[in-house]
Amino acid sequence: VLGLLMWTLIAGTEYFLYPAFGWVMFVAVFYWVLTIFFLIIYMTMTYTRIPQVPWTTVGLCFNGSAFVLYLIAAIVDASSVTKELDSHNYNSWAASSFFAFVVTSCYAGNTYFSFISWRSRTLQ
């Protein structure tokens, strides 16, 4: 939900005039779609029907890559916020920057828990 909020705040502005926001949009939309995909897989318990896939490793790689790329996108987003004549863009970009860091911290926490799950699975 926070990732969706982040990219809708940017999408409601003229972000296409600034290449940095294109990168932020790519990361946000890409990981939002993948998160929905994995949510559907876990809610329908499809992962139990495909035991060949190491789901703990997949989860760790997904969350770790999301954390790293969201951190880069959040820094790019925050550094690209500029005060313009149109305050609507400024307010939306500043809010999206805040939510980018919130989403980054969520993925960081999820990466930690995925690592704990992965480590306990590999130690058995």
Image (tube, grey):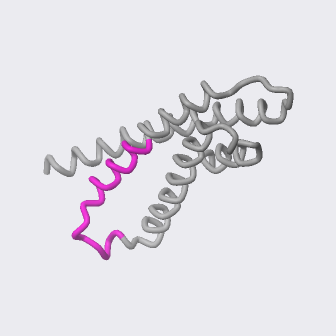
Residue that sits furthest to the bottom in the current view: 49
Lateral position of residue 72 relative to residue 49, left or right: right
Q: Give above or below for 4 relative to 79.
A: below
Q: Nearer the viewer, residue 88 or 122?
A: 88
Residue that sits furthest to the left in the current view: 124
The count of marks equals 0
Which residue is at a point 83% across and 35% down the rendered structure image?
88
Which residue is at a point 60% across and 39% down the rendered structure image?
19
Q: Give the quadrant of residue 38.
A: bottom left
Magenta segment main secondary structure:
helix
Q: Nearer the viewer, residue 75 or 100?
A: 75
Lateral position of residue 41 relative to residue 11, left or right: left
Q: Nearer the viewer, residue 28 or 116?
A: 28
Which residue is at a point 52% across and 61% down the rendered structure image?
36
Residue 113 magenta-highlighted: no
Q: Nearer the viewer, residue 19 or 82?
A: 19
> Where residue 45 sits: x, y (%)?
40, 71
> Where residue 66 sits: x, y (%)?
44, 44
Tell me which segment is drawn in magenta.
Answer: 47-66
Which residue is at a point 55% across and 30% down the rendered structure image?
76
Q: Give the quadrant of residue 101.
A: top right
Lateral position of residue 99 relative to residue 56, left or right: right
Lateral position of residue 108 relative to residue 53, left or right: right
Q: Give above or below for 81 relative to 12.
A: above
> Where residue 115 sits: x, y (%)?
30, 42
Q: Give above or below for 46 relative to 56.
A: below
> Where residue 53 sits: x, y (%)?
25, 66
